[in-house]
Image (tube, rainbow, N blue to C red):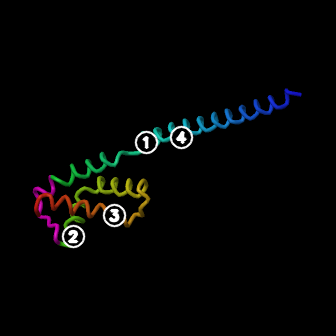
Amino acid sequence: MQNPPRRNQENRLSKVGLRSLQWAIILSVSVVLFYLLKLTLPDSREITRQLDDCLQPKIQHGQYSSDDDGKSAEALLNQCPSEAEKWTTWCERYSGDDRTTCTVKVIVAAQQAIKKFNK
């Protein structure tokens, strides 16, 4: 008669151990997926650096103003179309913002770049 309580206790321990093992597996898979996702996402710093590398020489040698309601920023971005498009696409895909918001963000970034040169 003492076997049934012991089996119940063993069953409870087995269930607790199984649950712990399930959570450990879920956590491990989640960590692996996080790092795989992180490795496959384009780095925003690299995309921003590419845009800056294109914009800065043009700002230094061009006639741009940060006080013209974004006209100079748009003209400047037209000088770096592939970099601006890459930045906007990255923003749209990975920030959760829509295309219009990302376009405004890249224009604001260009305006800030112009301001760095006191223009």
Q: CA distance from mark 2 to mark 4?
A: 46 Å
Circles 3 and 1 in contact, beta carbons < 8 Å: no
Residue identifier under label 1? 38
Residue identifier under label 4? 30
Q: CA distance from mark 3 to mark 4?
A: 33 Å
Q: Earlier in the sequence, mark 3 or mark 1?
A: 1
Stretch in magenta? 57-67
86 displayed left or right of 65:
right
Q: Residue at x 15, y 58 (%)?
A: 116
Q: Earlier in the sequence, mark 1 or mark 2?
A: 1
Amino acid type indicated by mark 4: Ser
Residue identifier under label 2? 71
Circles 2 and 4 in contact, beta carbons < 8 Å: no
Q: Residue at x 37, y 65 (%)?
A: 101
Q: Quadrant of the C terminus?
A: bottom left
Residue identifier under label 3? 103
Mark 1 or mark 4: which is in front? 4
